[in-house]
Image (cartoon, rainbow, N blue to C red):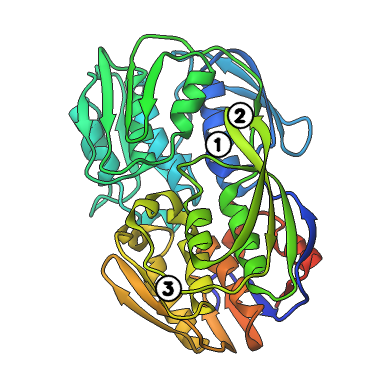
Amino acid sequence: MSSATGRDWIASKGTPLRGELAVPGDKSVSHRAIMLASLADGVSRVEGFLEGEDARATEAIFRSMGVHIEAPEAGGRIVHGVGVDGLRAPAGPLDCGNAGTGMRLLAGLLAGQSFDTTLIGDASLSKRPMRRVTVPLSRMGARIDTGEGGVPPLRIHGGGALQGIDIETEVASAQVKSALLLAGLYARGTTTVREPHPTRDYTERMLQALGWPIEFSPGFARLEGGHRLAARDIVVPADFSSAAFFIVAATLVPGSELVLRRVGMNPRRTGLLHVLRLMGAEIRETPAGEQGGEQVSDLVVRHAPLRGIEVPVEHVADMIDEFPALFVAAVHAQGTTVVRGAAELRVKESDRIATMAAGLRTLGARMDETPDGAAVHGGAQLQGGGVESHGDHRIAMSFAIAAQLADGEVRIGDIANVATSFPGFDALATRTGFGLREA
């Protein structure tokens, strides 16, 4: 197997997963903490910031627009806000790296500035669809040019007057909703976003925490332009999507019992917990307070046998990033697990349905693709082999889970982008009991 980055993992059966661990800070909250603290009046202190490449790309972008950001220690940032009207024109293009969240949210925020900007990304991000954001933003008066086919780079023309709108989005996407709300900060009048299904409300919660008047409920958000943000200290909770890999692994590996501390439990993020419990998983949660406007809990996960189910469509949007790990869980369930309504997986860092199906088949599983989901037939004993992540961090980590139950070593190709969301995953995984090393 060839690797696009020259970096692969060799994964194999380890030991039962044991101990206590804290996964890195939530990537989605880290992006928003930097963005909104930069626009606030005053100095904000951020704790638990994710030291991953995606979040640091957003940090670098705001530095290049005149925001002074100190990094006194790992996971800590001191952001000297410049106010909603205080950003300055950057000297060149703004590089989002692999961060689709960063690019889509910035499209909305930068549409309201007085200067022009260009957003670029890496090879993976440069293939991802942006019209889902640029088209509704154009209804507000934004002028954004894309590459051929509606992909990056995004050339955003500043200096225009934005107008608030009342819109029902075509796709259930927190990134689209957030882009519109961030543009709404700079728009005349009221911006109202209605969604076909509720999505994560991180942007709404943080805007409210920093003092911007906003009304929101599941599937609905409304704000007016023309207000100010007030600096405050922000504690970023542990990332549920990062915790998900250990939740699934501990559920699958016999003899496992893991404790995950202070995991963010935003109800629009934790659909995987509901689905795993429907499948028979044993996951106990103990509330542990609030961080960054988000409820957090300690989770205790023990090995449990699983059964195949039809995943309730109402949980799909609340677990869209966790499906690669769920597909691995479904392979080890008794019976068939059916997923529908998840077409969004086709346009992530990779086509996550096709990539997982190809890799799992290589290892001996049966997974039938559909346009918006899959049917995973459980009960197969996985074998060793070579699989390709296509540079998708969540695919790479999911195959690392799969290898813990395979007969033979699994070589996982192109794993460098794991650092975008979960730096140190391999070290934490091996300490917990994974068989995992870099090739």
Which mark is first along the chain, 2 or 1? 1
Which mark is first along the chain, 3 or 2? 2
- The three-letter code of the residue at mark 3 reads Thr
**Near-viewer residue (5 or 232):** 232
Mark 2 nearby-residue class (10 Å; few <14, some 14–19, many ≥20): many
Query: In the image, what residue occupies the spot 33% across and 56% down?
Result: 313
Q: Relative to 323, is 157 on the left or the right?
A: left
Tell me where residue 378 appears, x and y as whole percent: 47, 81
Q: Is residue 111 visible?
A: no
**Disc number for residue 422:** none
Q: Residue furthest left?
A: 139
Marks 1 and 2 close (CB-CB < 8 Å): yes
Q: Mark 3 points at which residue?
A: 355
**Disc number for residue 29:** 1
Q: Name the residue under label 2.
A: 292
Q: Is residue 148 visible?
A: yes
Local secondary structure at mark 1? helix
Image quadrant where residue 311 sits: bottom left
Image quadrant where residue 43 sits: top right
Query: In the image, what residue occupies the spot 69% across and 50% down?
Result: 23
Tell me where residue 236 appears, x and y as whole percent: 64, 35
Front: mark 2 or 3: 2
Mark 1 nearby-residue class (10 Å; few <14, some 14–19, many ≥20): many
Give the vertical position of 14 relative to 82 (above or below).
below
- The three-letter code of the residue at mark 2 reads Gly
Which mark is first along the chain, 3 or 1? 1
**Near-viewer residue (209 or 131):** 209
Tell me where residue 81 appears, x and y as whole percent: 58, 17
Q: Relative to 399, is 111 on the left or the right?
A: left
Give the vertical position of 160 relative to 293 (above or below).
above
**Near-viewer residue (367 or 438):** 367
